[in-house]
Image (cartoon, rainbow, N blue to C red):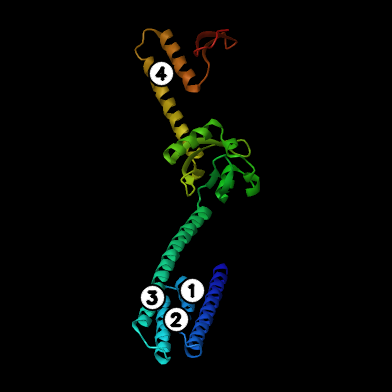
Amino acid sequence: MGKMEEKARGGIKLEAKLLVLFSILVASVLNALYAGFVEQVTIVYTHFFYIPILLAGMWYKRKEAVAVALFLGIVHILITYLSPHPLTVNEFARAAIFILVAYVIGYVSEQRAEREDAVREREEKYSAFFKTSRDPVFITSTDGRWLDFNDAMEELLGYESRDELFKVRIPDLYENPEDRGRHTELINQEGFTKEFPVNLRRKDGSIINVLVTSVAKKDENGDIIGYLGTIRDITERKKAEEAIKRRLDFEETVATISSRFVGTSDTDAAINDSLADVGKLSKANRAYLFLSREGGTVMDNTHEWCAGGSVHR
C-alpha cells in the first residue's frame, strides 16, 4: 500500500507540473502574439520564453526541454516573419540560444537527478540492510550516545524496547569501560576496525563475547561525528572453543601423568609433579594426596602442591 500511495502521489505531482508548464507556455505564446502584432515589438517578449524553458529543463529531461525551446524558437521566428519587422539572422540566433539554454538546464537537471537517485538507492539498500540484518547494526555518536540501532541490538543486549536501550550510554555496556576508549581510538586512527573483540554486559548483568566491526562516520569536512558498525555474538562459539581446549588439556594432563609413572624410580617426585599438573589444570591453589588407612577412619596428607604465592597451613 505504501508504494502504491507514493506512486499515486508522484503521478499527481507530475500532472500538476505538466499543467503549470502548459499554462505558462500558453501564456508566453499569447504574450508574444500580443507584443508582436499589437505592440509590434519582438525583443521584449522573448525574455518570458525562458520561464517555460527553465521549468521544462528542471522538471523534465533534455529531450522535453529542447522540444519546448524548439517550439518557442519557431513561434518567435513566425511572429517576426508575419509582423512588420524584418526577419534577420538574430531571430534564428535567439532561437538557437533557447535550445542551448534548454539543453544545458536539462543536462544539469539530469545529472542532479542521477545523483539523487544514486543517493536514494544507497539509502534504500542501507535501510533494508539495517532492518533485516540478523546481526546487530548500530550508529553511535563520538561521545557514546545511541543514534540508531536495529531490533537485533535490543535482542542481543536483552532490552525490551528501543526507548529503554536508548537511555543506556555505550561505555556502560562494556565489561571493561577502558575497552571503549581503545576501540574508538583505533577507529579514529585507522578509519575502521574489523572484528574487534570486546565483552559486553547485557541488561541482566551477564557477559557476552562479541566481535565489533566499525567504520568512522564523517561529515562533509571529513571530521568524525560518529561510528557505524555491526556486532557478532560469539559467546557460544567461545564456550565451545573453551570446552574443546579444556578437554584437550585434560587428555594431555592424563597422558603426561600416566607416562610419568612408567619406569620412574622417584615416586614422590612423580606424585608432586602430577599434583602440580592437576592443580594447574583445575586452576586450583592447592592439590593434595591423602593416604587412607585403618579401614578409612584415618587419612594422612602424604603429598601437597601449592601454587605460587600460596601459604602452607
Tag 4 residue: 257
Report the amino acid beneath label 4: Ile
- Which mark sits nearer the N-terminus, 4 or 2? 2
Tag 3 residue: 97
Instruction: Quote the CA–CA distance across marks 4 and 1.
Output: 90 Å
Tag 2 residue: 43
Instruction: Quote the CA–CA distance across marks 1 and 3.
Output: 16 Å
The 10 Å Cα crowd at callout 2, few under 14, some 14 to 19, many 20 or more, is some
Q: Nearer the viewer, residue 230 or 94?
A: 94
Identify the residue shown where x is 36% and y is 10%: 264
**Closer mark to the observer between disc 3 and disc 2:** 2
- Which mark sits nearer the N-terminus, 1 or 3? 1
Identify the residue shown where x is 44% and y is 18%: 277
The 10 Å Cα crowd at callout 1, few under 14, some 14 to 19, many 20 or more, is many
Identify the residue shown where x is 47% and y is 22%: 281
Report the amino acid beneath label 2: Ile
Residue 69, compared with residue 135, is above or below; it is below
